[in-house]
Image: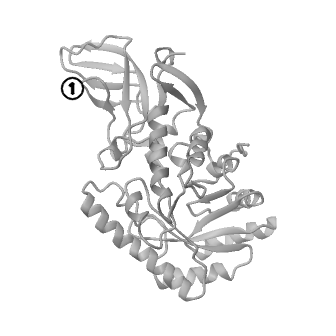
Amino acid sequence: MRVADVPTPALLVEVAAMERNIRRMAAFFAEGPCRLRPHFKAHKTPEIARRQLAAGACTGLTCATVGEAEVAAGLSPNILIANEPIGRSKCDRIAALAAGAELTVAVDSAAGLAEVAAAARRAGVAIGVLVDLNVGQNRCGVAPGADAVTLARRVAATRGVVLRGLMGYEGHLVAVPDRIEREARARRAMRDLVDTSEMLQAAGLPSEVVSAGGTGTYDISGRIAGITEIQAGSYVLMDSDYGRLDVPFEQAFWVLGTVISRPDPARCVADCGHKSMTKDHGLPTVRDLEGATVVALHDEHATIALPPDAPVRVGDRVHLRPSHTDPTINLHDVFYAIEGDHVVGVWPIAARGYSEHRSSATVR
């Protein structure tokens, strides 16, 4: 199959660019004590995760949901669910995974801890726990310092769970455009995380894992003493939001569409609307068509403003660069893996849309 034969809208991954991204990130973490724990939620695709793990410098995989962890459990024996699982059914599924893998979850409350521990005891397994700190994003997380130590003591005293350390995501900083500002603010956020880790150790509590970071801060947080792993994910494929930053990774995925209308010289319409890509971080950009701009995404349509002399005809293909990787990929069932004009593989996005009530689909 050639790219021209791919039915649209479709998700393309340029294999060579993706593999260069994987090698660059692996090489960075091969040089220091901190390790990479790639975030599976960025692509949800076993074939990509296998290549990330094979490149080395990885301590395991990060997942955002129990469903993702069920898919990823066949890829790595070490899984972190970087989220607070609540509810008996979710926690029982986590406990089932912990029977065959080193499974760690985040907690930031006594109530959440109790649910995870109860599931572990029912299943007769041990589930690892990272105490989640709010390092400035103001999403989940207990306050750094004394509050975190108090919760860590409770974890250490609870049957069914094992305290492994701390987690703190500086997600509010990963896309700060100015490098100097991003680095200064990230270092302050990581100081709270490292200081709290030292408080745990001073109290006789384990803190062998201190997990943080993203694509925009991997080379900042990943070189701070005391941080043991970075949860970057978007680097492997990139998007236009991260593409604004000074990170050394290439655009490796595109939404492919077909022009279905050229109603006037200044406009065309393609068949790839917001059912095939998100616009939460902005509208997509257009590749290989100078002066073309996406001005609107509708359910099934992308409206593109054109220079009047643009050589665009009905039936032409367009490559759009999404603004946000993770939710765009979640809209598709497969990647078409391409090398030049050739499709060299069709890769299932196995954790795509993996809602928490679906049955397990562990990859083996």
Looking at the image, which residue is at 67% across and 47% down? Answer: 75
* Residue 328 visible in the snapshot: no
Quadrant, the N terminus = top right
Q: Position of residue 304 (x, y in %)?
A: 28, 25
Looking at the image, which residue is at 59% across and 31% down? Answer: 347
Left or right of 175 on screen, residue 275: right
Picture quadrant where residue 119 is located: bottom right
Left or right of 103 on screen, residue 219: left
Callout 1: helix, strand or loop?
loop
Q: Position of residue 281 (x, y in %)?
A: 35, 45
249 or 197, nearer to the observer? 249
Q: Position of residue 136 (x, y in %)?
A: 38, 69
Vertical relation: 356 (above or below) 33? above
Q: How many marks?
A: 1
Q: Which residue is mark 1?
A: 291
Quadrant, the C terminus = top right
